[in-house]
Image (cartoon, rainbow, N blue to C red):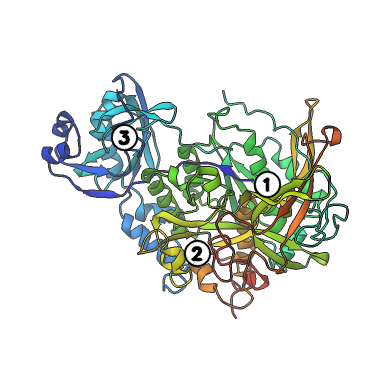
Amino acid sequence: MRSNRAKLRAVSMAATLPMVAGALALGIPAAHAADSPARDVLKGTKPLWATAKADKGATSNSAQVNARVYFAGKDAAGLAAYAKAVSDPSSPLYGKFLSAKKAQARFGATKAQVAAVKSWLTSAGLKVTEVTTHYVAVSGDVAAAEKAFSTQLHNFAKGSKTYRAPAQTASVPQSLKDAVLTVTGLDNAPHKANHDNTLPPPDAVFKNAGPFSSYYGSKTASTLPDAYGQKIPYAIKGYTGKQLRSAYGAGKYTGKGVKIAITDAYASPTIAFDAGKYAVKNGDQAWTTGQLHQSLPADYTRIDECKAAGWYGEETLDVEAVHAVAPNADVTYVGAASCYDDDLLASLSKVVDNHLADIVSNSWGDVEANQSPDLAAAYDQVFQLGAVQGIGFYFSSGDDGDQVAASGVKQVDTPANSSWVTAVGGTSLAVGKGDTYQWETGWGTQKATLAADGKSWAGFPGAFTSGAGGGTSKNVAQPFYQKGVVPDSLAKANNASGNRVVPDISAIADPNTGFLVGQTQTFPDGSQQYSEYRIGGTSLAAPVIAAVQALAQEARGGQAIGFANPSIYAKYGKKGVFHDVTDNPTGSGLAVARVDFANGLDAKGGLLYSVRSLGKDSSLSATKGYDDVTGVGSPADGYVQSYAKKH
């Protein structure tokens, strides 16, 4: 399961404009240009959908605007350079991390910059409502916002709805060009993820029907039709921690002494009970007192719009998967106030500002086409501030393959596309008898249902349903660590100079070879009861990799790994470190049989029979070497040990 969230936006700073003539050339009204004759443009603040054709006229001057002005910090270039140096094993600064306090002192906004930004905003007639180390939040009417940012706000048609947005790119006075990174909130289109302050009850119950395999291939669907010329196994009931730890080479390591943070929106009211009961029932180590923490906002917003209860399962999966693989790691859940970008970014900032963990798992994202440049820059700044402190961020790569079936456009997901995070792709995993690793394919599913006569699979192998996200970014340049590893056929697919390719590493994601979770859910009679079900998605892969990184950090003597991509790619090609995942590891075609309850609960509504083919990820392929489904592969027995200090 992966929540589709966060339409990100970002900005790069532009050169100083000539005075009034330059402002007019950009379409800035003369009156505004006269107020601040020299301006610095905040690229990306005018959305692509705010076109002349879609323009429905000026927004009322009395309409209200809530915006955030993000600080650039005192040395943006130095921050990026230091983040790279401390993360690169070949650098003499590798591992020389800063404390949160020193990082802020060295790279954060100065008191003078904060004061200057506040003064400029209030002089335009805006009210400062919040000041953090990252931004100034303001509110006010449209007229004041137009004066501050030297643009007009118009109403524009976007799909079937109308939203407010700048008619010209926003700008700031030249004197603030080194202080302001970007502004968000000038447009009011929803920038959110899909997945009053009282949270709703848990979602309606969902259960898997059997028969099941207890390990891959343990129970054959002997009465169902063949697939790929042979009888196929039933889908597993759901792997547990012992099986995943064995598959990914945990060995003796448990994550002891390592802190992991998990970010999502909202917070499950039953997480402590559910995680505790699940661990005891499924052979995981019991949670100790104080091992699971929550850091939550004072209030929740947009509860109905964001479908808050849908996020409970996400948190449950992440918490239980991390503990299953790294049972001694300290876990902090950081819940956002809503599924909107600003709130998700605030949760990540909280982790960095307070150094709540060295490893951060994030099972959320949105398609790159919905990414605008302003917030992407704000996110990258937080990722870089994390990197200089030794904090690494792990993001799921998506559950819709190349995104063509879901969005109509071949694209990657964001924030997984950021060059400052580790993008985690997905696999289908076969763990055999005795918890032995058998093989993995790239996660990509085709589904066919049982024919009416029960003698064949109708339309076999069927249509694509889901698969690990991946591919080549259209927006992000190729990072240094991917050069020499990622094939040019991928890196240069969209640009001759090369772009970021997703993912970096991978782990179990296929729901048909998924993970068993336990969660309190709402039953038809209205009661709330604990129940268990199998789940997957790159929402599973991300916390599994985060947990494996905790094992690696323990093997390293507790020293933080930080932003892991340079070290991951430096290990590429070394014997025994990665499983080189391909789509057809047995050479015969692979599939599992599934039996599901038609009503999601019990057999009263009938049973649904289907065959799920493995290794069929849209136009993406898991091939020998680096690929756009699994990256460098999944952790093998030697991965965790490769981080161990040599004596």
Relative to 240, is 127 above or below? above
Q: Kindly state the secondary structure of the residue where label 3 is placed.
A: loop
How packed mark 3 is, by other alpha carbons closer than 10 Å (few <14, some 14-19, many 20 or more), is some
Q: Which residue is mark 3?
A: 51
**In the rendered view of the protein, which quadrant contains the N terminus?**
top right
Relative to 623, is 446 above or below? above
How packed mark 2 is, by other alpha carbons closer than 10 Å (few <14, some 14-19, many 20 or more), is many
Q: Determine whether, in the image, residue 588 is placed left or right of residue 281.
A: left
Please name the residue shown 31% across and 31% down the image.
53
Whether residue 211 is visible to the viewer of this picture, yes or no, is yes
Q: Position of residue 413 (x, y in %)?
A: 50, 50
Q: Which residue is mark 1?
A: 317
Q: Residue lying furthest bottom in this view?
A: 647
Please name the residue shown 82% across and 59% down the image.
231
Q: Position of residue 93 (x, y in %)?
A: 42, 70
Q: Which residue is mark 2?
A: 565
Q: Nearer the viewer, residue 587 or 416?
A: 587
Tag 2–tag 3 contact (CB < 8 Å): no
